[in-house]
Image (tube, rainbow, N blue to C red):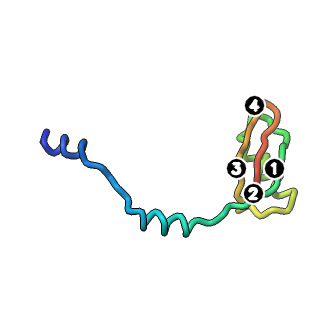
Amino acid sequence: MLLVALGFGTMSLTTSSEYVAKTSMNQKKVVLGPTYTIPWKSCCESPLTPIYNDLAKRGYPGTTNFTINSTTSTTVTYTIW
């Protein structure tokens, strides 16, 4: 058992450069959209709630992708992508 455990400790995982090249060519470019800062009641709701409400008010579908950039006690800032 110890020999098997030591064997795993000395093994190295390698990736062929051909696989890496294929993977990097298959990646899509992500285009960032607008960034919005909206009010948020941090005491009693998730930051997702005002973001989804804001997206709906702006006419975006519910499946819109976004990243939360920052939060304060009163605001949340997110970027659409």
* Numbered circle sitting on residue 47: none
Q: Residue at x 76, y 47 (%)?
A: 78
Three-letter code, disc 3: Thr
Instruction: Tell me, yes or no, whether the two marked residues, 2 and 3, touch with CB atoms within 8 Å.
Output: no
Nearest to N terminus: mark 3 or mark 4: 4
Q: Nearer the viewer, mark 3 or mark 4?
A: 3
Q: Nearer the viewer, mark 2 or mark 4?
A: 2
Q: CA distance from mark 1 to mark 2?
A: 9 Å
| Helix, strand or loop for disc 4 | loop
Three-letter code, disc 1: Thr
Instruction: Tell me, yes or no, whether the two marked residues, 2 and 4, touch with CB atoms within 8 Å.
Output: no
Q: Percent from the top left, x then y, of residue 13?
A: 32, 52
Q: Percent from the top left, x then y, of residue 7?
A: 19, 45
Quarter holding the C terminus is bottom right
Residue position for label 3? 67
4 or 39: nearer the eye?
4
Three-letter code, disc 2: Leu
Looking at this rendering, what residue extends furthest in the front direction?
A: 17
| Helix, strand or loop for disc 2 | loop
Nearest to N terminus: mark 1 or mark 3: 1
Residue position for label 4? 43
Q: Residue at x 58, y 65 (%)?
A: 27
| Residue 62 picture quarter | bottom right
